[in-house]
Image (cartoon, rainbow, N blue to C red):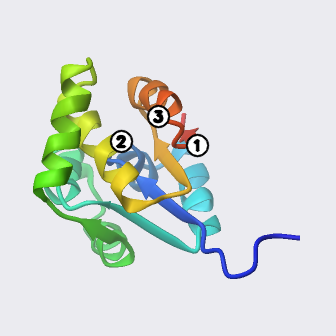
């Protein structure tokens, strides 16, 4: 039996959102995983990151729905400091931002389509899920 009163939170990085919004197996799998969470969050940086990555191929209606379905982390001095520390340790800049945000969010799972982010999330014990 599961924990009483526990809410399962998934953190979706920009690569996961790109995968979910793209047609194909990765998108369907990602959408199923997202629906399995009680709540989902990301950093508000994805409002720039995802449209820049997908460009005109992006389904704008699906994107607006996705944005409205996510709790958004925002910049803070603590988040900036943690992301900087991860970058100094070798994490690429954007994954460092998402990893620090995920840690601050208290999420149960970190969802990504990026192998480097997955590897870092594993090191940080964020229970990562890799979308292919």
Residue extending furthest toward the bottom: 5
In which image quadrant can residue 60 be found? bottom left
Q: Position of residue 5 (x, y in %)?
A: 67, 82
Q: Is residue 15 left or right of residue 106?
A: left
Mark linked to residue 15: 2
**Mark-to-mark CA distance, 2 and 1:** 17 Å
Q: Position of residue 20 (x, y in %)?
A: 45, 53
Q: Which residue is mark 1?
A: 127
Labels 2 and 3 touching (C-beta < 8 A): no
Image quadrant holding the N terminus, namely bottom right
Q: CA distance from mark 3 to mark 1?
A: 8 Å
Marks 2 and 1, the one that precedes in the sequence: 2
In this view, the mark in front (3 or 1) = 3
Is disc 2 in contact with disc 1, using a CB cutoff of under 8 Å?
no
Instruction: Please tell me whether mark 2 or mark 3 is closer to you in this view.
Output: 3
* Residue with the most extreme right position: 1
Residue at horizontal 48%, vertical 24%? 119
Residue displayed at 36% across by 69% down: 66
- The residue under the point 48% across, 47% down is 110
Q: Residue 9, how many percent across, how many down?
A: 53, 65
Depth check, mark 2 against mark 1: the one in front is 1
Q: CB under 8 Å between callouts 3 and 1?
A: no
Q: Residue at x 65, y 74 (%)?
A: 6
Query: How many other residues sit within 10 Å of disc 3, few (<14), some (14-19) or many (≥20)?
Result: few
Q: Secondary structure at mark 1?
A: loop
Q: Which residue is mark 3?
A: 124
Instruction: State the image coordinates of residue 36 (x, y, percent, origin top left).
Output: 64, 66
| Secondary structure of residue under mark 3 | loop
For the C terminus, the image quarter is: top right
Q: Which mark is residue 119?
A: none
């Amino acid at each position: 039996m599961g924990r009483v009163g526990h809410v399962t939170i998934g953190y979706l990085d920009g690569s996961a959102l790109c995968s979910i919004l793209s047609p194909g197996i990765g998108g369907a799998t990602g959408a199923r995983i997202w629906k399995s969470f009680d709540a989902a969050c990301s950093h508000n940086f994805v409002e720039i990151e995802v449209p820049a990555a997908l460009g005109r191929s992006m389904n704008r209606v699906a994107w607006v729905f996705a944005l409205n379905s996510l709790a958004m982390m925002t910049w803070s001095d603590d988040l900036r400091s943690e992301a900087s520390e991860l970058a100094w340790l070798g994490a690429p800049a954007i994954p460092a931002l998402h990893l620090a945000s995920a840690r601050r969010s208290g999420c149960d799972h970190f969802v990504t389509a990026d192998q480097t982010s997955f590897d870092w999330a594993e090191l940080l014990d964020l229970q990562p899920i890799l979308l292919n």
